[in-house]
């Protein structure tokens, strides 16, 4: 996402991200990866490990259970949120992430975004993140983990 070593960044260079929470984690996706956000339609087949299906018009989307991917839930049935963040994975497949609250748009200065250390990624459930930024939320510092679509794959979710 950000390569600080090969480029000179100014304080005005930013990245727009869609921010949402899963349990106590603040997570983000670059806005370029988000196709749309809709009210969650009824889920079908909500029992397949980390995955479920939803029909939207003439397409069927895979619903990703990030709570289970992050080892936050032991339930096989995904938590059905009020909103559905629709994104395109690096494989080209369109998928959705259920959210309880509407996400927000945030402009992050690129100089504030840091790569997560490999040792941290290996010892935590946040293996689907690649970068972190420290943001102030209601005057309290908060870590914002930026998800890596290369690590959020349907095949790795089983």
Image (spheres, helix red, strand yellow):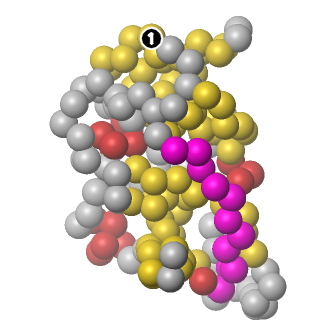
The residue closer to the viewer here, 150 or 128, is: 128
Residue drawn where x is 34% and y is 59% of the image: 24
**Residue 146 position within the rendered picture, expressed as x and y whole percent measured from the top left:** 53, 62
Inspect this view and state whether residue 39 appears: yes
Which residue is painted at 65% across and 31% down in the image? 38
- Residue range of the region highlighted in magenta in the rendering: 101-111
Q: Position of residue 55 (x, y in %)?
A: 59, 12
- x, y percentage for residue 71? 25, 47
Is disc 1 placed on a helix, strand or loop?
strand
Q: Residue at x 70, y 11 (%)?
A: 57
Q: Which residue is mark 1?
A: 44
Q: Tell me: residue 50, above or below residue 101.
A: above
Give the tally of numbered discs: 1
Quadrant of res 49: top left
Q: Quadrant of the C terminus?
A: top left
Q: Is 148 situated left or right of 127 in this image?
A: right
**In the figure, residue 108 lies in which quadrant?**
bottom right
Q: Judge whether 134 appears above or below 99 on screen.
A: below
Q: Quadrant of the N terminus?
A: bottom right
Q: Nearer the viewer, residue 39 or 148?
A: 39
Residue furthest to the left: 74
């Amino acid at each position: 996402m950000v390569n600080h070593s090969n480029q000179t960044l100014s304080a005005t260079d930013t990245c727009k991200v869609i921010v949402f929470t899963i349990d106590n984690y603040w997570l983000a996706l670059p806005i370029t990866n988000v196709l749309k956000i809709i009210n969650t339609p009824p889920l079908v087949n909500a029992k397949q490990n980390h995955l479920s299906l939803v029909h939207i018009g003439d397409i069927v989307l895979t619903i990703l259970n990030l709570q289970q991917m992050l080892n936050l839930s032991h339930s096989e049935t995904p938590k059905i949120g009020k909103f559905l963040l629709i994104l395109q994975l690096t494989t080209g497949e369109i998928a959705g992430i259920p959210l309880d609250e509407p996400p927000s748009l945030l402009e992050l200065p690129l100089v504030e975004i840091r790569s997560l250390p490999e040792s941290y990624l290996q010892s935590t459930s946040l293996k689907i993140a690649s970068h972190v930024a420290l943001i102030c939320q209601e005057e309290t510092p908060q870590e914002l983990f930026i998800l890596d679509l290369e690590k959020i794959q349907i095949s790795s979710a089983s």
